[in-house]
Image (cartoon, grey):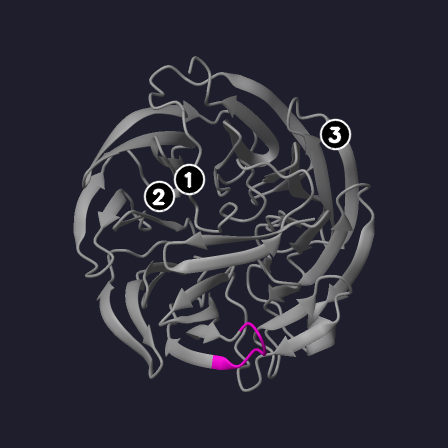
Amino acid sequence: MKTMCRMVVGAMAIFVLASGVMAGDWPQWRGADRDGINKEKGLLSDWTQTPKQLWLVTTPGAGYAAPSVAGGVVYVTGSSGSGKAHTGTLFALNAKDGSVKWTCEYGPEWNSNYDLARTTPTVADDRVYLISGMNNVICVDAKNGKIAWSVNLLERFNGRNIGWGIAESPLLVGKTIICHPGGPDAAVAALDCETGATVWTTKGLSDASAYCSPALLTLGGKKQIVTQTADNVVGIDPENGAVLWKHPHRNKYAVHPNTPVAVAPDMVVVSSGYGYGAEGLQISASGVKQVWKNKEQDDHFHGMVLVGKRLYLTPSSGPLLCVNPETGVVLARAEGVGRASIIATEAGIVGYDEKKGQVTLVKLDGDQMQVAGSIPVKFGSQQHWSSPVIANGVLYIRHGDALAAYDLKAGQ
């Protein structure tokens, strides 16, 4: 196995990749560097003719979570059942044709409001890690689909679940997995990747979880885990769990699912929906300082992407915005894209529109944006809440119990 360290603009993400992983893989939430950026060359730059669909499959379990792709395998979670009896299943599908390689029932899944699976798996060192809506952390052998270990965070840390169920995707830092128990002196915890044993908890920080998937960033010259809890944005020492800084950040429902984005060596942007908006925070050895705030940029849960020196996001009411991340000033709008989950490619921004039920390509030209075609999502059911994924020239779109793959290198 190889330990690979990838540098991101203002960030460093560290995890041990699965054997056989390819450069174009998407092995975790928001991609290899956890920044929502696909770095492949030669992707289709014009979607006015719909890209070719390679395959479409349905799974016995449905979910809102995006898939992960590593070593020629697509990993995606699903939930099945009715009433209070919901079971989560991890599906391993062959990337070539969508056929099932193996399945793994990983235990109870969220069974209340919007009762579908939420976690995007993280694939590392021949294992697959996921966090259920019931706040169970599960480690599965990527070779045979057998559970290696499972930890109930609510029981271990006296934590509490939240209104719409835990919805985070695991972050691996070195040999630890970062999670949000939401317990006393344990708002955030690190578990040993091999055994599930507790490595540290955030002593003195007891906030509830807030649906956020954390990031490992370098800010103010220091490597730190940055995440959002119910009440704060926080920076945490990855070595021992010490809280380095915290900044009050709470909206109407304490819903903060957006992964923080480093936009400069000493600056991070966070955004939350329900009219709260986005904030630019400056981080230094002396603490945290708010540089700007813009209520218009109230990204609900669809993610933000930094491309060069511009930040792209979609507020709750749409459209896609191009923002100066140092000031929060909106520079341009793409009216053809509404409230959408977005990622970035060399060809432009790819957005999965929640209301229109379509995936749109938006070309970037300086600060200007132009729609370059879209793919209608006419399969699956329930909300269009998954995030698009692009791995090895293939676009993956999840909708409920359906997963489709599209060729983005055809004719290139």
Pointers 1 and 3 in contact (C-beta within 8 Å):
no
Res. 100 mark: 3
User: Which of the two residues, 386 or 67, is positioned nearer the viewer here?
Assistant: 67
Residue 379 appears in the figure: no
Secondary structure state at the residue bearing disc 1: loop
Residue 213 magenta-highlighted: no
Q: What's under tag 1, amino acid-wise?
A: Glu
Q: Residues within 10 Å of mark 2 (few under 14, many from 20)?
A: many
Counting residues from the N terminus, which is met first, the one under dot 1 or under dot 3?
A: 3
Which amino acid type is shown beneath numbered disc 3? Answer: Val
For the residues labelled 2 and 1, say whether their Cβ atoms are less than 8 Å apart: yes
Q: Where residue 83 sits in the image (x, y, percent)?
A: 71, 51
Considering only vertical position in the picture, is 199 above or below 99? below
Marks 1 and 3, Cα distance to the nearest angstrom?
Answer: 28 Å
Question: Which stretch is magenta?
Answer: 238-243
Q: Which mark is residue 108?
A: none
Instruction: Work out whether mark 2 precedes mark 1 in sequence or the reverse, and give the earlier one.
Output: 2
Secondary structure under the numbered disc 2 in the rendered image: loop
Residue type of the residue flagged with mark 2: Arg
Residue 25 figure quarter:
top right
Residue, disc 2: 339
> In what element is the residue under mark 3?
strand
Label 3: few (<14), some (14–19) or many (≥20) C-alpha neighbours in 10 Å: some
Residue 35 in the figure: left or right of residue 103? left
* Residue 1 x %, y %: 70, 48
For the residue pair 34 and 285, the one nearer the viewer reads as 285
Task: Name the residue that disc number 1 marks.
Answer: 354
Task: Give the mark nearer the N terminus: 3 vs 2.
Answer: 3
Residues 330 and 308: in front is 308
The residue drawn where x is 49% and y is 75% is: 236
Q: Is residue 354 above or below residue 174?
A: above
| Residue situated furthest front in the rendering | 2
